[in-house]
Amino acid sequence: MQEIKIISAYRQSLKTRILEAASDAFSQKGIKSVRMDDIAQSLNISKRTLYEIYENKEVLLYECLKTSKARAQEEMTFIAAQRANVMDIILDIYRSKMSQLQKINPQFYSDLEKYPQLQSFLEEQHDKDRTKLKDFLRRGIEEGYFKGDINVDIIANVFDAINEYMKNHKLYTEFPLEQLFNNMLFVTIRGICTQKGVAVIDTFLTDSQD
């Protein structure tokens, strides 16, 4: 029985190591250029062992995305619990996202579009995130940082439209990811802010330039 527990613990540890190694490789090099052989070699395990745990590259990529989404949600939940208002939450998420984007090769997003089943998973996640976004906008209105006359459904659609345009026109191949996120976040958010919210953003941007 003890031996079975040890084997089970080792296998779980190995699954975690594989996910971390694969996630880093996919993000930094793009999905297409990373082979299962490369991942196995980076961990000093056989390709057979890798395929016993993840039957193919798409399954491994799906698990990487699922894990990444779960971690992102945990981080947002933690930030929301630690910060007093929506503006503090936005700025914390901005700092975290900018740090992450510096480690991502834009080719990753181009390659991801070639996996329809994974796109379906991302769309399902987006629908859940959209509901949370509207709740967040309502909270910002209540706290006085977002204008009281905005329609949260329209604003959510506007955010979707911006994201879709960037994706469909592959703007991430023309501009740095950090620059795209920076402009998308602050230009759109600033437009729905009250003077109270604008003051927080302007102070943050001014301090960031110092």
Image (cartoon, rainbow, N blue to C red):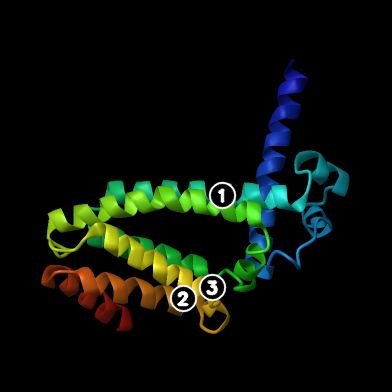
Q: Earlier in the sequence, mark 2 or mark 1?
A: 1
Q: Earlier in the sequence, mark 2 or mark 3?
A: 3
What type is the residue that disc 1 sits on? Phe
- Callout 2 secondary element: helix
Q: Which residue is mark 3?
A: 168
In the rendered structure, the answer to whether residue 194 lies left or right of residue 132 reads left
Q: As rendered, which of 83 and 34 lies closer to the eye?
A: 34
Which residue is identified by label 2? 178
Give whichever of discs 1 and 3 has the lower sequence position.
Answer: 1
Residue 75 appears in the figure:
no
Q: Which quarter of the figure has residue 168?
A: bottom right
Give the CA distance from mark 2 to mark 1: 24 Å
Which residue is at the far top? Answer: 1
Q: Nearer the viewer, mark 1 or mark 3?
A: 3
Residue 17 in the image, given as x and y percentages of width and height: 68, 47
| Amino acid under disc 2 | Glu
Q: Is residue 23 left or right of residue 80?
A: right
**Relative vertical location of residue 173 with respect to residue 132 in this rendering, above or below:** below
Residue at position x 76%, y 63% from top? 34
Q: Secondary structure at mark 3?
A: helix
Residue 121, numbered circle = 1
Residue 78: % across, % down: 36, 47
Q: Is residue 206 left or right of residue 141?
A: right
Can I make out residue 47 in this image?
A: yes
- The percent position of residue 189, horizontal first and vertical second, equals 27, 70
| Three-letter residue code for mark 3 | Asn
